Image: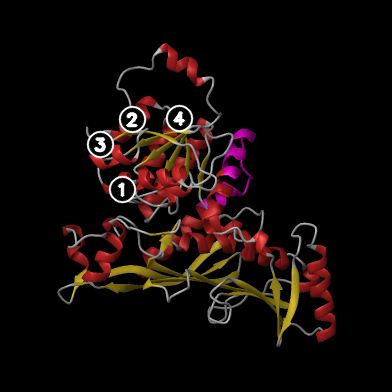
């Protein structure tokens, strides 16, 4: 059991957890803790750090980390330390770290906290989730919770166990807090403007979601270092089960808000496909800081040195009879000055709601409204302006401007808090669910529906 010297130098408050039973003083100290204490398991993904980017009154400042020795835990602790040491609104996390080979068993035995956060290597994630729930621990999981059909079967069992053990199992769906998506959803619920959601077809879906991501990017102002296993689809998962989780979730959340979806009756996966992004050794080195590919990537090497990563995918399916299409694309690096992008269209009988983030939009998500029905231009414009006016009390500063044959919904900067801040919003909602002792009735069945869709798509794409 060992923590590297660099971690001790960077994280002065990091401690090895004792193997002995808690002392009397520790038990008494428990009463002074905040209601929730975080236990982070094997934090190989930067999302584990983003959960701690901001403090919450209900979340204790002492956070427990259980992980194997290595760069993943070191990078996580560096990220948390950067939040503690920043000049603007610094946090005050105290990380207590255990890095024995039995890290997961140690966490289950000690249970110093009441929430397990898991955001990292996905190969064992579903198993970790199930074992934590069996032990009566609440679980907040980064997506994806499953990467294949066997994992999906385990997840079904785990939700039953969570209900029996009265703990909350929830995944981190940050995109529900992205403001352009929120407004798109709001407008789709306004029949006077949108009409009804079209049923669509395979060739012309009623709703399309496309997400473009990049292996090289910046997080919290610094270039992101990715673990080598991120490029192994047996550990990270292919594109159709990874980022696709967000896209399928948004379609369910927008098209059938607050409704229970039964994956056995309401979903039909029609087709799916996958394709690879090719990385050179120099690209791999930039994003991992490694000079060579690990042996477990040998199976994915083509043309002597090119790494084939099946990070891209597409699923065509129906949800309650509505045709939907999701696509995820990974490139190596975004053009200068740009970021990950999202394209979306919801087609209604009166209006289409479109999110674009191309060059015209300065690569920033922008919501457009276009007339699709038989209403006159004047009547459509009046309906749109009235709808936007009705939303002013909920979204102050919202406005609309004409842009050729379309309209742009202008969203004030104050409502654009950024992707990294969405993690705090998800965490706040999750803690409220625990305090209330329940989630909305649709959350669990819709999580199952989401992961059924992605894992079924994974099967069909192969």
Label 3: element kind: loop
46 in the magenta segment = no
Label whose residue precedes the other's in the sequence (1 or 2): 2
Mark 1 in CB contact with mark 3 (< 8 angstroms): no
Quadrant for residue 320, please give it: bottom right
Q: For the residues marked 1 and 2, what is the alpha-carbon distance in whole angstroms? A: 17 Å
Which region is colored magenta? 428-447
**Mark 4 Cα shell of 10 Å, populated few (<14), some (14-19), many (≥20):** many
Label 4: element kind: loop
Mark 4 or 2: in front is 2
Q: For the residues marked 4 and 2, what is the alpha-carbon distance in whole angstroms? A: 15 Å
Mark 3 or 4: in front is 3
Mark 1 in CB contact with mark 2 (< 8 angstroms): no
**Who's the residue at 80% across and 80% down the image?**
380
Q: In the picture, which quadrant includes the N terminus? A: top left
Question: Is any atom of residue 264 visible in this view?
Answer: no
Q: In the picture, which quadrant includes the C terminus? A: bottom left
Label whose residue precedes the other's in the sequence (4 or 2): 2
**Who's the residue at 37% across and 59% down the image?**
224
Label whose residue precedes the other's in the sequence (3 or 4): 3
Q: Which mark is residue 15?
A: 2
Which residue is disc 4 drawn over? Answer: 113
Label whose residue precedes the other's in the sequence (4 or 1): 1
**Who's the residue at 54% across and 55% down the image?**
174
Which residue is disc 3 drawn over? Answer: 3
**Who's the residue at 56% across and 53% down the image?**
422
């Amino acid at each position: 059991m060992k923590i590297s010297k660099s971690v001790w130098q960077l994280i002065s408050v990091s401690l090895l957890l004792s193997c002995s039973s808690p002392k009397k003083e520790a038990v008494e100290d428990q009463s002074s803790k905040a209601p929730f204490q975080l236990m982070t398991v094997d934090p190989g993904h930067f999302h584990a750090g983003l959960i701690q980017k901001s403090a919450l009154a209900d979340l204790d400042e002492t956070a427990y980390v259980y992980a194997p020795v290595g760069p993943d835990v070191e990078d996580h602790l560096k990220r948390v330390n950067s939040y503690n040491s920043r000049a603007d609104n610094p946090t005050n996390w105290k990380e207590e770290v255990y890095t024995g080979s039995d890290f997961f068993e140690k966490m289950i035995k000690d249970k110093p906290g009441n929430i397990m956060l898991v955001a990292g290597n996905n190969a064992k994630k579903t198993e970790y989730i199930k074992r934590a729930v069996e032990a009566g621990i609440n679980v907040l999981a980064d997506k994806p919770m499953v990467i294949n059909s066997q994992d999906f079967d385990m997840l079904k069992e785990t939700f039953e166990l969570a209900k029996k053990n009265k703990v909350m199992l929830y995944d981190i769906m940050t995109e529900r807090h992205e403001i352009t998506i929120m407004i798109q959803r709001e407008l789709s619920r306004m029949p006077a403007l949108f009409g009804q959601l079209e049923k669509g077809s395979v060739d012309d879906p009623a709703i399309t979601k496309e997400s473009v991501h990049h292996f090289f990017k910046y997080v919290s102002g610094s270039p992101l270092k990715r673990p080598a296993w991120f490029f192994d689809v047996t550990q990270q998962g292919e594109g159709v089960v990874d980022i696709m989780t967000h896209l399928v979730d948004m379609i369910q959340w927008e098209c059938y808000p607050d409704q229970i979806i039964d994956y056995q009756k309401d979903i039909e996966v029609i087709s799916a496909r996958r394709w690879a992004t090719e990385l050179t050794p120099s690209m791999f080195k930039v994003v991992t800081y490694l000079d060579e590919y690990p042996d477990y990537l040998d199976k994915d090497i083509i043309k002597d040195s090119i790494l084939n990563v099946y990070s891209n995918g597409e699923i065509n399916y129906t949800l309650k009879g509505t045709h939907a299409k999701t696509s995820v694309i990974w490139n190596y690096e975004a053009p200068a000055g740009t970021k990950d992008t999202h394209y979306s269209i919801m087609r209604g009988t009166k209006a289409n709601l479109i999110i674009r983030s191309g060059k015209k939009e300065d690569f920033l998500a922008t919501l457009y409204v276009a007339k699709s029905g038989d209403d006159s231009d004047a009547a459509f414009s009046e309906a749109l302006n009235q709808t936007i006016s009705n939303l002013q009390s909920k979204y102050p500063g919202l406005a609309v401007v004409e842009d050729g044959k379309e309209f742009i919904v202008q969203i004030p900067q104050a409502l654009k808090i950024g992707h990294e801040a969405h993690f705090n919003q998800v965490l706040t909602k999750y803690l409220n669910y625990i305090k209330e002792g329940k989630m909305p009735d649709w959350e669990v069945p819709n999580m199952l529906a989401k992961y059924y869709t992605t894992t079924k798509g994974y099967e069909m794409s192969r």
